[in-house]
């Protein structure tokens, strides 16, 4: 396998693994399996993990379509933005 092909396949696997982790995290937060994370689900999760941030503020940040819930696409965007912020501050 040529080196460029190896790097490309490795990057693809890494992306798939990250996507799988995002799906798992979303499913853990979506307790009622509705396909969205409600303010109640978000608040409960934050408390479970000992994070006492304002769930309403976090939801408002992520809720791009303003329906009062976080769908999978919004969740992924939020997580990717958080990771970018962490990298930038490191």
Image (cartoon, grey):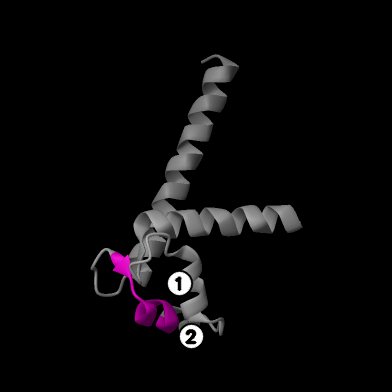
Residue 90 on image: x %, y %: 76, 56
Give the structural element (helix, strand or loop) at label 1.
Answer: helix
Residue furthest to the front: 66
- Residue at 51% over, 72% down: 58
Q: CA separation, marks 2 and 1? A: 15 Å
Asked if residue 12 is positioned above or below residue 37 in the image, the reply reads above
Mark 2 or 1: the one toward you: 1
Asked if residue 75 is positioned above or below residue 3 in the image, the reply reads below
* Mark 2: few/some/many CA within 10 Å (<14, 14-19, 20+): few
* Mark 1: few/some/many CA within 10 Å (<14, 14-19, 20+): many
The residue stretch that appears in magenta: 36-44
Q: Is residue 29 magenta?
A: no
The answer to whether mark 2 and mark 1 are in CB contact below 8 A is no
Q: Earlier in the sequence, mark 2 or mark 1?
A: 2
Most common secondary structure along the magenta stretch: helix
Image position of 54 (left or right of 24): right
Mark linked to residue 47: 2
Residue 11 on image: x %, y %: 53, 34
- Residue at 75% over, 58% down: 89
Image position of 35 (left or right of 19): left
Residue 48 on image: x %, y %: 46, 83
Residue 24 on image: x %, y %: 37, 60
- Residue at 52% over, 32% down: 10
Mark linked to residue 42: none
Q: Is residue 42 magenta?
A: yes
Comparing 52 with 12, the one in front is: 52
Comparing 85 with 67, the one in front is: 67
The residue pinned by badge 1 equals 59
Give the structural element (helix, strand or loop) at label 2.
Answer: helix
């Amino acid at each position: 396998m040529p080196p460029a092909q190896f790097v490309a396949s490795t990057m693809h696997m890494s992306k798939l693994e990250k996507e799988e982790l995002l799906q798992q995290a979303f499913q853990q937060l979506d307790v009622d399996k509705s396909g969205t994370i409600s303010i109640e689900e978000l608040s409960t999760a934050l408390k479970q993990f000992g994070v006492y941030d304002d769930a309403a503020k976090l939801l408002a940040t992520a809720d791009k379509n303003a329906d009062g819930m976080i769908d999978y696409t919004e969740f992924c965007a939020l997580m990717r933005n958080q990771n970018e912020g962490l990298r930038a501050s490191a």
